[in-house]
Image (spheres, rainbow, N blue to C red):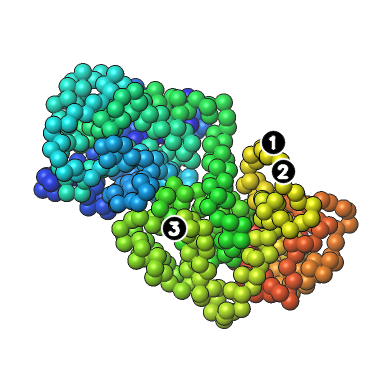
Amino acid sequence: TNQAYNAEFAVIFGTKEALDDVAQPLGPKTDHSWLRRFAAVQLNASDDGSDKGPSDGRPGFKRSTSILDTDARIPSTFESYATVPPLRERPLGCAPMASNNGWEVSLVSFTVPHSASDQPNACLYGVSLVLRQKNATHDKETEQVSCKSELIRGANNEEFVQKLKEESWSNKHRENGNTVGIALVSRLNVIPAMRSTLSKFYNEFSKNGEESQLIGGLADFLGIFSSSDVDTDILSCTLAPFLNDGSSPWISQPIDHQAKVFEQDSGEHLLRSLPPTPLALVFITALLEQKIVFSSSRRSILLSAATAINKLLDPLTWPHLLVPLVPSNLAGDLVHYPAPFIIGIPAEDKGSVQILNSLPDDVTLVDLDVGRVILAADYGAKKLGGDLRLQVLYLAEEMGSLLGTELASKSWCCDDPSQTIGNGSTADPRIDSFPIAQRVCSDFITELLAGTNSCCTWVEESCEEQSEARLTQHQAGECIVLFDENRFYHLKNLRAKGKYMPLLQVNSSHNNGGRVTLRTATNLALGLDDFDLVLETFLRSQAMSTFISSRSKSTMVYW
């Protein structure tokens, strides 16, 4: 079925009416006082309402008969992540997408932290289509907007279309302007399919006519779900063909293929937002498990940056707090979180500028719009002082040169006498850059891990008189891994001096069955003379501890 390859829920939200504050709310209270949830429907239930899970074995949700049934599945803070703030004046007309009637449209990818027993990734993945318009100064009642009623499907679509003609949601005056959006939600990363679905949904509703009127008609279609007497099955039926179209390219692929495609796409976005040296600085800062804040006016790039940096850390993993998009009302407290974190703060949210201008001294700011990294003034443990910061800057400069040479050799090696200027007759074919950056970062990390297994000693206690079953249980509870730090530092120094070489010639370092294989080249090795504090900080990291404890007994000395 298509259920495993696209959204599980659709949520419609928008600007509250004046009466919403005194009337019984139709949905859960959100963090944004000017927003309200209009409707939420399940998209993957069978027609008889049974709980039929997707083909990959993912547990399905019980069919939602009302918005209140979804509260346990979709947190009340959901709209804070899915929405886009009210419009602001922009010079040069730099709106994401604007029509003649002042509508601004955004398609945003995001995640929402959410822990549940059936939630595999501790978050919900979402894509929202948000329409925003400031209240016009003229009488909007005289304007005619048209919704493409032929696209509306459902058992009661005629009654729905008639109600749509009688009530115009977009023509009402609201203090905060008109904002209405639809978000698709899933527990798995199916963002490519969800983006395709909403993109086609928007294009079909806004093409072949006056764009400003058709966008207003789409806003009316979504806004009418603010009424409690509207049949929400109309929404699921109308979305059905778009969901099928969005899922169709992925049906023949493995269930995790979309996540892998999204990771690669995210990597390309990051490489186009940061030059090589700032990219290296962010990578090293994440590798040493420092506090990082991404900032951008483009909300989707925040998720891309966090995803890409996490991917560059392979084979290690980021073991700390990771929230790619944090609403400004939560960000003020979260930047003071005592442990390492990677969070994203949208630059255009109300209050974000003040938060970004007053970050704690131990937080590194990554401005994805400008392409710069402001390294934390208080970098790493206090006992290391500013020396670690200097070593990190030095290492980032060297690694940035390596990345630049690999990613853009013509510009980074322009002083090389072998570089010439082409005649312009042919253009270089476009290549995906992120796999190149992944290879460089992977080689660097694997060089850091080289020799780790020989520093480990597996120690376990056992009693020969115990039965085999009981012995296994006893061993599992008493096994420990001892790590020789002095040997680790000694090996790093040897590698930096071109020693401790492999017996067999290999072209690259890699992880082979739990053993880190040395490569012949030692250009990525770090010595104690220049990078002793970097090595010490890396060795103390939680990711390194997890890596050591995950090694199998066969890869280390056993006692």
Name which residue type carries label 1: Ser
Which is more foreground, mark 1 or mark 3? 1
Out of 135 and 441, give the one closest to the viewer: 135
The residue lying at 36 percent from left, 63 percent from top is 353
Q: Nearer the viewer, residue 127 or 75?
A: 127
The image shows residue 472 at horizontal and vertical percentages of 66, 54
Q: Is residue 322 left or right of residue 308?
A: left
Q: Secondary structure at mark 2?
A: loop
Specify the quadrant of the image occupied by residue 49: top left
The amino acid at mark 2 is Gly
Q: Residue at x 44, y 24 (%)?
A: 244
Q: CA distance from mark 2 to mark 3?
A: 38 Å
Q: Is residue 477 above or below residue 363?
A: above
How many numbered marks are there? 3
What percent of the width, then of the height, locates residue 282? 56, 61
**Residue at which label 1 appears:** 425
Q: Amino acid at mark 3?
A: Ser
Q: On residue 422, which mark appears?
A: 2
The disc at residue 295 is 3
